[in-house]
Amino acid sequence: MKGYAMLGIEKTGWIEKNRPKCGGMDAIVRPIAVSPCSSDIHTVYAGALGERHNLILGHEAIGEVVETGNLVRDFSVGDRVIVPAITPDWNSAEAQDGYSMHSKGMLSGWKFSNHKDGVFAEFFHVNDADGNLAHLPVGIDSASAVMLADMVPTGFHGVELAQVKFGDNVCVIGIGPVGLMAVVGAKLRGAADIFAVGSRPECVRVAKELGATQIINYKDGDIAKQILELTNGKGVDKVIIAGGDNDTFAQAVTMLKPGGIIGNVNYLGEGTTIRIPRSEWGCGMGHKTIAGGLMPGGRRRMERLASMIVAGRIDPGILLTHRFQGMEYIEEALELMREKPSELIKPVVIF
Ligand code: NDP
Ligand code: ZN
């Protein structure tokens, strides 16, 4: 089969591989639609996962089941399915402890284009099919449904980590597709003011449409200072980090009220340490909590989020600024994610 792969750090290309084999609890899926992610860019160009050779990229897909193992109960050949980016081993100790995303080791629930070939191929393998696949409800647009694989649950996980409550003032740092979904999640959870940090005009426009009450441009100066000015020096109850760099943490701590919580879903790609400003953190006694996490993945999460589309509560199709028809466009779509032109939020490739 054909797949679009990381050939080495900073190198990508089409390769041929054998079709993956299906274990008893597994499924083999043919993609219907896929989307490249900022994480694919970190993997290839920042070497985030270290050196990888001929590893097929991609972890955001919906598809059609073409083969199932003899122990799979709920899925059959021909079923159209949502495939979460994170596909944990549900019988692991970590999953039983509530940390499915770390099943069998830290971050190891993330398997596609990390521990095994990803979804940018004619076929891909899904472990624990009953635990990880979800039936795609009839009537949901396939391209929008791809956003359920990673963008919606990751943005929402930031909101979960920050424990957003009714009436919270929230700052969402970063309004790429992940941060925009965090804006949606914060609004659904009853946030009062939502300050959204970003600069690209299309992201800013959509952030406002989705419920951001104020836009902060990080290029206009220190965002903590801007937030403190806008809140009469009080700061915000919750911060969700979905973009920025290592300094963003210090800014998040600074803009947070005592008792506040930071939910980070951003990938921190540089340096060996993260700076926490001492006095702004209450000299260690400020009750300012920092939580960071990988999206948990799994079937029930996909089913719940899909039901929110069906019920008209969310429309992640709003993220799709670029649609391509044909597997060969994966290369172009990935390149767009690298360049991040001003009009881009998220591309999708329909097979
Ligand atoms: P994007 O690159 O599309 O968005 C990043 C956002 O951060 C943009 O709004 C950008 O602004 C903003 N930004 C950039 N620099 C700064 C800065 N110095 N201060 C404040 N804001 C800044 O990323 P995605 O939305 O695709 O992904 C966000 C992050 O989430 C990535 O790191 C990705 O790897 C990670 N991720 C994590 C997952 C998880 O499970 N935890 C899963 C998937 C992704 P501008 O408008 O100027 O571009
Ligand atoms: Zn992703």
Image (cartoon, rainbow, N blue to C red):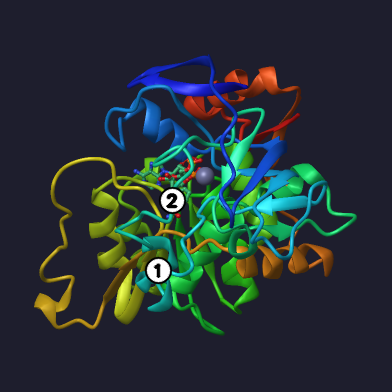
Q: Is residue 296 above or below residue 82?
A: below
Amino acid found under the numbered disc labelled 2: Trp
Q: Is disc 1 surrounded by few (<14), some (14 to 19) or many (20+) residues within 10 Å?
A: some
Image point 30% across, 59% down: which residue?
Answer: 105
**Image x and y of residue 52, in percent:** 34, 28
The residue furthest front is 70
Which mark is nearer the camera, 2 or 1?
Answer: 1
Q: Quadrant of residue 148?
A: bottom right
**Image x and y of residue 107, in percent:** 35, 55
Q: Is residue 256 above or below residue 172?
A: below
Amino acid found under the numbered disc labelled 1: Ser
What residue sits right under mark 1 in the picture?
92
Q: Secondary structure at mark 2?
A: loop
Q: Is residue 193 left or right of residue 29?
A: left
Q: Nearer the viewer, residue 133 or 254?
A: 133
Specify which label sits upstream in the sequence, 2 or 1: 1
Q: Secondary structure at mark 1?
A: loop
**Spatial separation of the CA atoms under disc 2 and disc 1:** 14 Å
Q: Which numbered disc covers residue 75?
A: none
Q: Is disc 2 surrounded by few (<14), some (14 to 19) or many (20+) residues within 10 Å?
A: many
Image point 37% across, 58% down: which residue?
Answer: 226
The N terminus, quarter of image: top right
What residue sits right under mark 2 in the picture?
110
**Image x and y of residue 48, in percent:** 31, 37
Image point 53% across, 51% down: which residue?
Answer: 178
Tell me how many marks there are: 2
**Image x and y of residue 54, in percent:** 42, 22
Asked if marks 2 and 1 touch (Cβ < 8 Å), the reply is: no
Q: Is residue 339 in sight in this rendering?
A: yes
Q: Nearer the viewer, residue 76 or 140?
A: 76
Q: Is mark 2 within 8 Å of ligand 1?
A: yes
Image point 58% across, 51% down: which residue?
Answer: 151
